[in-house]
Image (tube, rainbow, N blue to C red):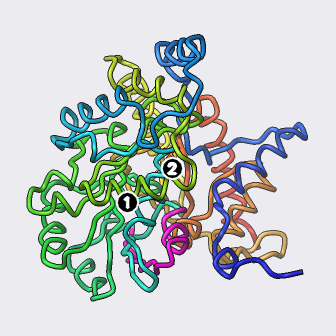
Amino acid sequence: MKTLSLKIQHIEESQTLAFTRIVEKMKAAGIDVVSLNAGEPDFPTPPHVKMAAIQAIEENFTHYTANQGIPKLIAAIISKFAVDNDLHFEPSQILVSTGTKQAIFNALQAICNPGDEVVIPAPYWVSYPEMVKLADARPVIVPTTLESGFKMTPLQLRKAINTKTKALLLNSPSNPTGSMYSQGELEEFADIVEETGIFVISDEIYEKIVYDGPKHFSIGNIKQIRDQVITVNGVSKAYAMTGWRIGYLGASNQVAAAAAKVQSQVTSNANSIAQRAATVALSAPSNDVDTMVTEFKRRRDFLMGECAKIPGIEISKPKGAFYFFPSMKAFIGKRIDGERIKDDEDLCRFFLNDQQLVMVPGSAFGAKDHVRISFASSMKELEKAVQRLKEGCRKLHEGF
Ligand code: PLP
């Protein structure tokens, strides 16, 4: 039998999805697992959004739509970009996709040639490097540290760019760290982007889930690089609509048309019913996002306070999204029952087996010795999680 493609052999499976599968199996076996690996809000999709979908079905809005998306959703996206981000697009500059994931994939396929490089600050969302590889380009990872608030500096960006660089992939607020770039910091990046002519893919999916600081700022709002920026977003996180699979991009006419060409040969239009639901999510005023963010903030503050009491855990306070990304370096090298915890994967395996507590290893996000902790779980679950975290850490400190 012939072998699989070389490309697929070099692609990692999404570790966050792999963990979800393990948890589902454990839960199905009746094990009391506490999961801190959720990548989605634990809130229901708002009722008025669900109603829009039901109505779409009842009206038989169940056929193919235009590849680019339905006109009403495109209008709602244009208006959202204008109101929230001060970004101004024509309909031809918008492409609706099957999740933000597909929007990013389309964008990369549209701009990358074999051998191109794409700069990705780490820690990064798990799919970025793999998507870059699928576009026959090379991910160039720029490491950042907890001490610097997990932010890339302009100097690091400048050093990472060469003649092969095609794009910078930015995610603010970030999954997995919750870090956020300020307008001033993005303006410094913009100078470099303008000078070098590279594209920026700006993944703004967590823009509405921000806590104490200033509002999210879109890099595409910086005039001199406007045509170089591909802004991607979606309804998954802000409207608790992960399963509906609607994302979108706003870009120059040339990029939007190229991305649409990719999509037209892969999936065609995003789900027609979900498009109608997303139109309502984006256009009907509601307090659901605010309620969700208030609750996330309460959980963040609780978890932050509790983790600060656990010796060995070092945390940078997340400004947005719903994740902590603590350094667990103090536990690497510890021995438990004679077994050495040699890295963050061993550490997560220990917490899973010993405490039935699920966290995702930092190496999945390009940062070893860390773990990702999601606070998209109820307070009751988080309280249980904290007890297990404390107990596991105590055992590790006392291990031999
Ligand atoms: N971008 C980031 C940073 C994410 O964390 C996620 C989902 O976890 C996505 C994109 C994908 O979102 P969607 O559900 O819209 O495909």
Amino acid carrying mark 2 in the image: Cys
106 horizontally vs 147: left or right:
right
Q: Position of residue 315 (x, y in %)?
A: 44, 57
Q: Which mark is residue 258?
A: 1
* SS at mark 2 in the image: helix
Image vertical order of residue 188 relative to residue 141, above or below: above
Image position of 145 with respect to 298: above or below: below
Quadrant where the C terminus sits is: bottom right
Q: Give me the residue at 17% from left, 62% from top.
A: 185
Whether residue 394 sits left or right of residue 271 in the image: it is: right
Residue found 41% across the figure and 45% down from its top: 321
Q: Quadrant of the N terminus?
A: bottom right
Magenta residues span 127-145
Which of marks 2 and 1 precedes in the sequence?
1
User: Which residue is tagged 2?
Assistant: 307
- The residue positioned 72% from the left and 69% from the top of the image is 346
Q: Is 128 included in the stretch rendered in magenta?
A: yes
> Which three-letter amino acid code belongs to the residue tagged 1?
Ala
* Residue nearest the observer in this picture, 352 or 392: 352
Residue 203 forms part of the magenta stretch: no
Residue 351 x/y as whole percent = 72, 56
Residue furthest to the left: 224
Which quadrant would residue 73 be assigned to in this image?
A: top left
x and y percentages locating residue 362 in the rendered image: 56, 65
Q: Element under label 1?
A: helix
Q: Residue furthest bottom?
A: 163
- Number of marks present in the image shown: 2
Closer to the camera in the image, 398 or 111? 111
Q: Is mark 2 within 8 Å of ligand 1?
A: no
